[in-house]
Image (cartoon, grey):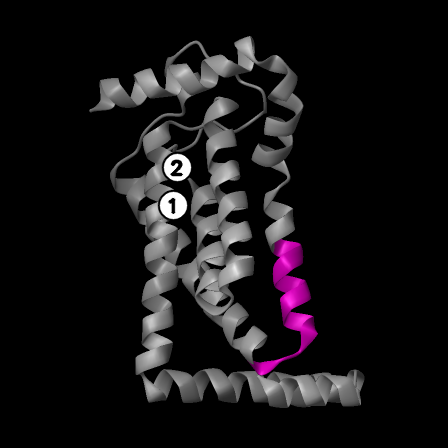
Amino acid sequence: MLQLDYQLFQIINGLAGSVSFLNPLMRFLAQHAEYLFYIGVIIYWFIRTESNRRMIVEALTAACIGLAISGLIGDFFYRDRPFVTHAVFQLIQHPANASFPSDHAIGAFVIATTIWLFRKKEGRLWLALAACIAFSRIWTGVHYPSDVIAGALIGVAAAAGVHQVFVKSRFAQKGQLVGIRLYERIEHKIWPKTKDNVREAHRT
């Protein structure tokens, strides 16, 4: 299995040499595309509808859970980065820390999956971006395919699991709503809602 993983890594990472004109794009995806998710979270939050805010609370909760799982796995099943043990096309700088699973894949797929659960059309675009980020981490030589696949699965599972808790648990729903309302009381004192914001909030 590990041999197959490495062979697939060689094929994808080898594209950095044979299709090098795509390297700048892959560097961007591997290093900076995650910031598009951060920007998306901020924009959705400050659209200031209840649905969006519930979505972002779920996404951040799931991200914390997913990354905590990643930390535990990294401690108990440590795996070196590809560039530590093999000759690779390494296109970006990266610390020689645990390779498995990919935190980038976890974070991207947690947010993308949560958005998809609330907004199917937009969610598909976010999932496509998450897949591109995961693929670029192999292309640039910092992850094996199994690292990003595991990260994607953890991200999807964490997002789906958290969503189910909030859907089925009235206690969780109430706690979520109380937290949002407490935040909004402070927010409204600084930035009162316009009539358009209020109408949109009622529609959701």
Look at mark 2 in the image and give the residue it sits on.
148
What's the residue type where badge 2 is placed?
Val
Residue 183, image x, y percentages:
62, 83
Can you see residue 193?
no
Residue 117 against residue 99 in the figure, above or below? below
* Foreground pick, 90 / 98: 90
- Residue depicted at 39% across the width and 52% down the height: 155
The secondary structure making up most of the magenta span is helix
- Residue depicted at 71% across the width and 83% down the height: 187
Answer with left or right where residue 185 lies relative to residue 151.
right
What's the residue type where badge 1 is placed?
Ala
Answer with left or right where residue 24 lies relative to residue 190.
left
Look at mark 1 in the image and give the residue it sits on.
152
Q: Quadrant of the N terminus?
A: top left
Mark 2–mark 1 Cα distance, whole angstroms, equals 6 Å
Residue 17, image x, y percentages:
54, 9
Badge 1 marks a residue whose secondary structure is helix
Residue 26, image x, y percentages:
59, 28
Residue 115 is labelled as: none
Q: Could you tell me if the residues under marks 2 and 1 are in contact, i.e. CB atoms within 8 Å? A: yes
Query: Which range is magenta?
Result: 38-50
Mark 2 Cα within 10 Å, few/some/many (few <14, many 20+)?
many
